[in-house]
Image: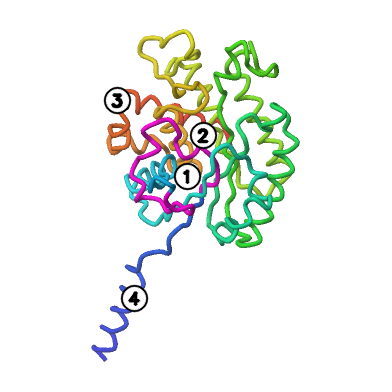
Amino acid sequence: MISRTLLSVGALLALTLAPASARTVLFLGSSFTYGAHSAAQHYHPELVKDLNGPNKDGETYAGVPAIFKQFTLEAGLTDYDVSSELVGGKGLEYWLTPAAATILPKIEKPWDAVVMHGFSTLDQAHPGDRTLLLSSSKRIADMFLKANPNAKLYLFATWSRADQVYPDKAAPVWKGKPIQQMGKDVEAAYEQAVKEEPRYAGIVPVGLAWNRAIDTGVADANPYDGLDANKVDLWAYDHYHASSYGYYLEALMDFGRITGHDPLELKGKDRVAEALGISPAQSTALMQVAHDTLAATK
């Protein structure tokens, strides 16, 4: 009788202590996710499964997915299994074309969560036109939800590109307008996409987080006229991609939206910032921006 009781207790403990199955997350995107032109691109690639494998130089991409994974570890969330499928200069429609046929078997899997985005100007050939985003976001949702009807799909709304606002050669749609306007327009397009395709779990409003960082004095508004004192530059040297600060903020937004945890929980625990050359004061300010933006959006 005692042995049976001990056996039952042992079995119960085994079930209780068994690790939960991993939460699989796929980041599907472009250079805006793999951290182009910044130290983030090479941040601990071993933390992420790069589904493309090594490039011609033997490197795998890390970027925002690796930073996200590190954030989950720092928050005590050890059950996230993170993968990425990233191709520079592509929007969502790319994954629906014959050119991506060899890649599809790698991504048509029952992911628990998928984070993805379209081209930074909504349509590369027609900046500001949301038609392509709206159609491709519906079709790609079908693909992922066919593999797992319970998958949580997120659209990552990208940031205002300074190179589309300030230079004389900028596209007319945003040239000369307030820097925040492009981010607002991109966010509005993604909001329409989610409204038309309600199976999406929501938006990761990174562009709105950039706007908030600028509006609250955390970040500089115009990289073309020099850097204001005590502010960070969210853009890389091309004023198009993000800097390490920008990708750090992007990853904070992903962390908060996907896990449901407050980015401010990372304060005092985070080691990513130091590795990227971000000071404690700067990282705390960016965490606050992420917290406030997530609190203000769904």
Mark 4 / mark 1, whichever is N-terminal: 4
Q: Quadrant location of the N terminus?
A: bottom left
**Location of mark 3 (residue):** 279
Check whether the beta carbons of the residues at disc 4 and disc 3 lie within 8 A of each other: no
Q: Which mark lies nearer to you, 4 or 1?
A: 1
User: Cα distance, mark 2 to mark 1?
Assistant: 10 Å
Element at badge 2?
helix
Q: Write down the quadrant of residue 101 in the picture.
A: bottom right
User: Cα distance, mark 1 to mark 3?
Assistant: 25 Å
Q: Amino acid at mark 2?
A: Leu
**Location of mark 1 (residue):** 260
Chain part drawn in magenta: 27-54
How is this picture coloured? rainbow
Is 36 contained in the magenta span?
A: yes
**Location of mark 4 (residue):** 12
The residue positioned farthest toward the left in the image shown: 2
Mark 2 / mark 3, whichever is N-terminal: 3
Check whether the beta carbons of the residues at disc 2 and disc 3 lie within 8 A of each other: no
Q: Write down the quadrant of residue 134 in the picture.
A: top right
Mark 1 / mark 3, whichever is N-terminal: 1
* Label of residue 294 in the image: 2
User: Cα distance, mark 2 to mark 4?
Assistant: 39 Å
